[in-house]
Image (spheres, coloured by chain):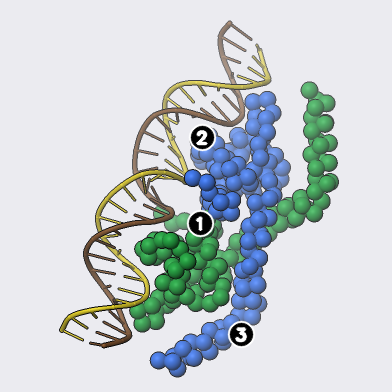
Chain colours: A blue, B green, C brown, D yellow
Amino acid sequence: MPIDPLSSTFHALADPTRRAILSSLTTGEKTVSDLAEPFDMTMPAITKHLKVLEKARLIERSREAQYRPCKLRPDPLKDIDEWMEQYRQFFEASFDRLDEYLKQIQTKKEDHDDNR
Amino acid sequence: MPIDPLSSTFHALADPTRRAILSSLTTGEKTVSDLAEPFDMTMPAITKHLKVLEKARLIERSREAQYRPCKLRPDPLKDIDEWMEQYRQFFEASFDRLDEYLKQIQTKKEDHDDNR
DNA sequence: AAGTTAAATAACCATATGGTTAAATAAAGA
DNA sequence: TCTTTATTTAACCATATGGTTATTTAACTT
């Protein structure tokens, strides 16, 4: 069953271990053992997490003797950032002008109450 | 088992139906039936999706006679936007200076080939 | 050739997910 | 009060998830 790219990216990010792995890759390429080291988890578990990240194209892997270095890929993160765009105005407005926002809600509620 | 807020937000967004529901809520409050209408899916399925969105605090629900209107909540989206911040420079640099980036890769590869 | 190290695969397990149909609840309308 | 409308809950199902241990593969080291 083919999953759309945005869903597979969000799914990959919906796990603290995988987010920590990504974060650790911001400083450069790492081997699987390097990535596994901070976690109280077996290697196969890490391998599975890497597969999820790889399917989401959030990481790219190469070969270096018996090592399989992982590298961060920017594209899917950029796609998420673009998806966020439609909501950015919404949540920025909500926080920048919280008082006004709350007043709007209140007004709307009163209008609504009037309609009963 | 308590799940961290960022994970539950990403998880909630990792489904096209739920993202469509959120998108549809940008124009204002909607009832469950309103939200369900575009989808070829039964009501209980929609109810479940709404529960996931509600747990992630991406929506807020109220009561209006027999209706349960849904409203978008900005906070978790803002949290994601803030989480993205650590990667923004990374992916913006990668795309703004794609040529340079590719050249770097190429140089690195050549260095590497030299080492064999 | 034998041993070591890095990583992946296989097989398994418990729980979660995303859907269904059928039944229950809540409030409005006749 | 009876019926209709809006929504949720319950029970079920197939598949996915996130972990495990044991085994296998691949490449380097001795």
Cα distance, mark 1 to mark 2? 27 Å
**Alpha carbon separation for disc pair 1 and 3:** 32 Å
Residue D18 lies, in percent from the top left, at: 47, 45
Q: Neighbour class for label 1 at 10 Å: few (<14), some, many (≥20)?
A: some
In the rendered structure, the answer to whether residue B40 lies left or right of residue B77 reads left
Q: Please state if A95 lies on the left or on the right of A115 as rendered.
A: right
Q: Name the residue under label 3.
A: A100
Q: Same chain for marks 2 and 3? A: yes
The chain letter for the residue carrying disc 1 is B
Disc sitting over residue B79 in the figure: none
Determine the secondary structure under disc 1: loop
Tell me the number on the disc at residue B15.
1
Residue B102 image point, x, y percent: 80, 42
Residue A9 at least partly seen: no
x and y percentages locating residue B32 in the rendered image: 42, 71
Q: Name the residue under label 2.
A: A44
Identify residue type, mark 2. Answer: Pro
Query: Which quadrant is the C terminus of chain A positioned in?
Result: bottom left
Q: Which amino acid does label 3 sit on?
A: Glu
Pinpoint residue C21: horizontal percent, then vertical percent: 28, 58
Three-letter amino acid code of the residue under disc 1: Asp
